[in-house]
Amino acid sequence: MCRVLEVSSSGYYAWSRRLPSKRAREDLWLREKIEAIHARSRGTYGAPRAHAELKAEGINVSRKRVARLMREAGLSGASRRRRKGTTKRDPDAKPATDLVDRKFASEGPDRLWVADIKYIPTQEGFLYLAAVMDAFSRRIVGWAMERYLKTELVLQALNMAIGQRRPEGVIHHSDQGSQYTAVDFGKRCRETGVRPSMGSAGDCYDNAQCESFFATLECELLDRRTFQTRQEAKRGVFEFIEGWYNPHRRHSALGYDSPANYERRHTASLSAPTAEGATVPVGVGLAGVQGNTE
């Protein structure tokens, strides 16, 4: 072998007994960290979010190095694909005015909510998920799951959001689906001071933030699991939203923070004194990243 490779026997034995270099040892340690992060993310994190997780742990390393180590380990993040919609309009219903006009930036929580419906396939048939997201933090503040696609479904999600957040004059933005244009839904909005808003028909960009959440749900959960029953699907979606997405999943639009932690930092910033002893205004230091809908 040494003759074929044109190396000396002594050189080979010296190489075989030599300890790995410092760089190689660091790569091995980093790779183990990255593999653990990838496993905690249910195999969904790519290099950007893995890099953000390492940074949060106080580990300073370049994103390119993280990407290289992930390639060598055969690790990759989940990728999105376009989803099918569930919107069915009622031609006799009058939709609410569009109060958002694709401007999803919000200076604080509970000023703008976005809502939509997603169907979830199971071996028993479809399960329908209605979700309400806070545009400021991307947090899912209300949700409901049923076997039917009726107004009661979106009312349950709205009532959960109202019960948890107690908003004042929040805008509720959705598509023009018949569930949102129904009389009962409009009545509930008036009773609670919620201001309904609806985008144009058949345009996903008019509700891009909620579409983005459902794309994440699809590529990180639904494309990776097959549910035998609706009850199994309910448990899986509940665990994804409340056990992973809200408290832990990092968002590029939030500076790679999670929705729950982003809201905590915002709350802390409101009471943090400035150099002159004043408090920080709502949204300072945080609202600037709200334009990204991904």
Image: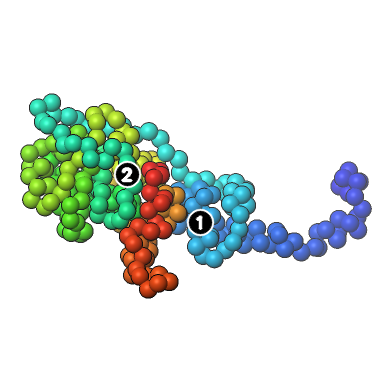
* Residue 110 in sight from this viewpoint: yes
Q: Position of residue 134 (x, y in %)?
A: 28, 51
Q: Nearer the viewer, mark 2 or mark 1?
A: 2
**Callout 1 amino acid:** Ala
> Which picture quadrant has residue 271?
bottom left
| Residue placed most toward the observer, 40 or 164 | 164
Q: Is residue 61 above or below residue 124?
A: below
* Residue 235 in sight from this viewpoint: no
> Which residue is at a point 16% across and 36% down the rendered structure image?
96
Q: Which element type, helix, strand or loop, lies under badge 1?
A: helix
> Which residue is at a point 60% across and 58% down the rendered structure image?
61
Distance CA(mark 2)–CA(mark 1):
24 Å
Q: Which residue is mark 2?
A: 104
User: If the image is split into quadrants, where does the C terminus sit?
Assistant: top left
**Callout 2 amino acid:** Phe
Residue 155 is tagged as none
| Residue placed most toward the observer, 187 or 245 | 187
Residue 52 is tagged as 1
